[in-house]
Image (tube, helix red, strand yellow):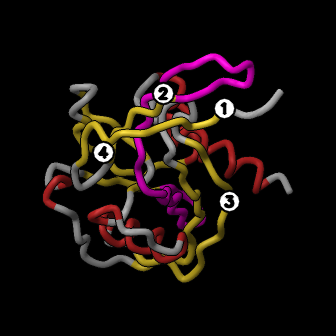
Amino acid sequence: MGMIRQVSTREVYRNNWLTLREDAIERPDGSDGIYAVVDKPTYALVIPHDGERFHLVEQYRYPLGLRRWEFPQGTAPDRQDLEPHALAERELREETGLRAAHLVKLGLLDVAAGMSSQRGWVFLATELTEGDHEREHEEQDMHSAWFTRAEIEDMMRSGDITDAQSIAAWALLLLYERR
């Protein structure tokens, strides 16, 4: 079988964080179709670890109407394309105030490959020093706290952590630790 081929594309919507486009496509069998695609820049997710505890952030997630705990993560403003390590350092500092002497790249995640082009790099941050956070205006309600490994896993089981990227990042961390 061949690949799906884009026949045409049109931008439906754009803001500072994403672009929504609609693509007319041709399937491998020659039939026509349509795809809606959310284009977002690559993000970085950082797992801050001080040797005993892990640092999470909590914020209100408007589409869910809920406050959620997750690992610090995000993209650069205005859809900038930053180098993954620089983006990870930026997100860690911005959301938590932490700085890491060591950042280890754990892997790459696809957010929702059936509808979005966004991908994200996962990092483990160690040898941390504390400083002031530099949160964006949209993050003004964000809180952060330290948790043990057992507390994080309990939060995942109980549904206090439901962020798919954070849970997938945790799996990458476990694989890294078992090497």
Q: Position of residue 1 (x, y in %)?
A: 83, 27
In which quadrant of the rendered image does the C terminus lie? Answer: bottom right
Q: Earlier in the sequence, mark 1 or mark 4?
A: 1
Is residue 161 visible in the rendered structure shown here?
no
Measured Cα–Cα span from mark 1 to mark 2: 10 Å
Query: Residue 38 lies in magenta, yes or no?
Result: yes
**Label 1, residues with CA under 10 Å away: few <14, some 14-19, many ≥20:** some
Q: Is residue 131 left or right of residue 104?
A: left
Q: Is residue 137 left or right of residue 150?
A: left
Indicate whether 99 appears above or below 175: below
Residue pointed to by mark 4: 58
* Region in magenta: 25-54
Q: What is the three-letter code of the residue carrying label 3?
A: Leu
Q: Earlier in the sequence, mark 3 or mark 1?
A: 1
* Residue lying at 30% horizontally and 45% vertically, measured from the top left: 58
Q: What is the three-letter code of the residue carrying label 2?
A: Tyr
Measured Cα–Cα span from mark 3 to mark 1: 31 Å
Q: Position of residue 153 (x, y in %)?
A: 56, 35
Residue pointed to by mark 3: 106
Residue pointed to by mark 1: 4
Indicate whether 24 appears above or below 45: above
Q: What is the three-letter code of the residue carrying label 4?
A: Glu
